[in-house]
Amino acid sequence: MARHHQHVTIIGVGLLGGSIGLALKALHGRDVHVAGVGRSLDSLNAAIKAGAIDSAHLDAAEAAPSTDLVILATPVCTFEHHLRRLAPVLKKSAWVTDVGSTKLAVVKTANRLIGQDRFIGSHPMAGSDVRGVANASADLFAAATCIITPSSKTPPTLRRRASGLWKSLGMKTIEMSPARHDQVVARISHLPHLLSAALMLLPKDDDLAAAAGGFKDMTRISGGDVEMWRDILLTNKQNILAALDAYEKRLRETRRIIAAADVSAIERNLIKAQLRRRLFVNGNLNR
Amino acid sequence: MARHHQHVTIIGVGLLGGSIGLALKALHGRDVHVAGVGRSLDSLNAAIKAGAIDSAHLDAAEAAPSTDLVILATPVCTFEHHLRRLAPVLKKSAWVTDVGSTKLAVVKTANRLIGQDRFIGSHPMAGSDVRGVANASADLFAAATCIITPSSKTPPTLRRRASGLWKSLGMKTIEMSPARHDQVVARISHLPHLLSAALMLLPKDDDLAAAAGGFKDMTRISGGDVEMWRDILLTNKQNILAALDAYEKRLRETRRIIAAADVSAIERNLIKAQLRRRLFVNGNLNR
């Protein structure tokens, strides 16, 4: 993070916001003031105790006037409310980014309320099924990828600032348009969440006595934050429906070859998945 | 394991067979002789070097005459072949079990070839997406659950022997009929594998650059052994098709509430999954 961001406001002091605060304080110590905005005194107090924020505020407008950088880290459907509070009081030189999991709707709203010259969307692909600042950590972002989603008129300086911020937290960064971002994450993140939740609800209670590592891994993300996921499903509906349709088509084909006991098709499918998984884990699929 | 099992034959010296060998040798040292049966000299040599087996054989019939206990740890469709080799040469006092992931077909075949008084099915719910004796470990089974599947006429002594064997390896044991076992594991193990493989094949290569922990967890088991999974899908077809149908019904309902942007139904679904996941992980669902 460049030297001129000496006052950072983080809106939402949960797992992600809290982890950003911890990372910034670990990097810059007293050279950065981190203001936290939350809706409950309990979470704000916990964030202060954890050392994730230096000051606590219930309203974004209160922290904003002195701030150089604002990071939105609440469920995406709350962004409009916070951006409306920020817009009239932000310094001319301040910039704004976010950690939201959907981008097209977010960027559109932020461009309208804050402007393309001061807002740039970010999506750090790091998180967890555990919630709250109590689980936050300064290295949550280390080695993960952050997708930055500039608009057509985003100034290069703003793109460099965003990239610099996430790289300072240990991330790799890639750029995508907001529309492309929403398509991609529907397939690699939003669909998997729905699959995980549906699987968690399928077996009977008795069945789960013997459930092992595979089932545990497959259902881990279904434990994730409800408000965050509700907002994701509402703001990326079309891409998620398309991903669901493509997935259901695959499942029907899987069903067909099992019903037909088509040994060679079954083997081919298992081998393709096994091989692709290996290439993916070893970073050999365009990574 | 009781003192009278001094000669154990493990058929298949991969991840599971190798891990059983390592665990038995760690527990009993020279008081147990572990004979390994495999189809390649390479894997048998690796198992000897790893200390998982004491002697190596290409044919089950070669090791069997002096054996007290035989454990089948190859893909389930190969069991019939090995059981036919074993049947004529097994000692009267010897008993046989297996680690196969499907039970109805296995138990039927084994009861016919070996007899209910000497065969009892086992399914240790432990494993991994990594393969081979190189990844075997003496504590692979620790704290996991083994499902034991006695038949209607299985003698109590045989049930105690099987239970004693798996408990000595650190496992909890539960009993189920072979038919019930196959229904349950279709939902908690076989369906998840199909979901994982289908997900691994869905995104485009480019999409995977940003895939994070959730996607990695959800696709881990798709890297599993192809022959083992092929045989599972072939021998538990009806239960797997039923589980797939129930799952697809859930997905269609998920699709419906997202398409309708039914906020309260979406929230209810996410909360139900989150809560059930928490109860499951904390062991509060009949565990």
Image: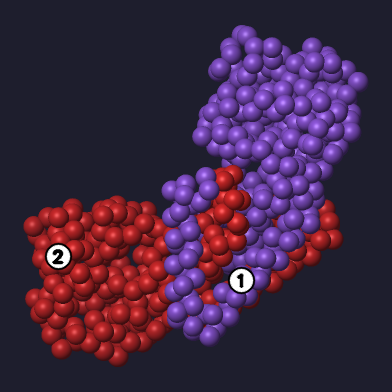
Chain colours: A purple, B red
Q: Residues within 10 Å of mark 2 (few under 14, many from 20)?
A: many
| B137 relative position to A197: left or right | left
Where is residue A109? Give x, y as percent: 86, 37
Instruction: Kindly state the secondary structure of the residue where label 1 is placed.
Output: helix
Label 1 resides on the chain identified as A
Res A166 → quadrant: top right
Q: Which mark is residue B223?
A: none
Point out the image quarter for the N terminus of chain B: bottom left
Instruction: Identify which residue is drawn at 55% across, 62% down.
Output: B201
Which amino acid type corresponds to the residue marked 1 in the rendered image? Leu
Please give the name of the residue rendered at 39% of the width and 84% of the height, measured from the top-left corner.
B105
Within 10 Å of disc 1 (Cα), the crowding (few <14, some 14-19, many 20+) is many
How far separated are the C-alphas under marks 2 and 1?
Answer: 42 Å
> CB under 8 Å between callouts 2 and 1?
no
In the depicted structure, whether residue A18 falls above or below residue B228: above
- Vertical comparison of A195 with B37: above or below: above
Provide the residue designation for mark 2. Answer: B34
The answer to whether any part of residue A52 appears in the image is: no
Residue B122 image offset from top left, x and y in percent: 34, 71
Residue denoted by label 1: A251
User: Looking at the image, which residue is at 52% across and 64% down?
Assistant: B197
Residue A101 vs A209, above or below: the answer is above
In this view, the residue farthest toward the bottom is B112
Viewer-side residue, A107 vs B102: A107
Please state the horizontal and vertical placement of residue B270, each as a whole percent of the image: 70, 53
Residue A196 falls in which quadrant of the image?
bottom right
On the image, the x and y values in percent for residue B143 come to 37, 53
Look at the image and tell me whether residue B285 can be seen.
yes
Amino acid marked by disc 2? Val
Q: Nearer the viewer, residue B73 or B46?
A: B46
Q: For numbered disc 2, what is the local secondary structure?
A: strand
- Residue nearer the viewer, A41 or A32: A32
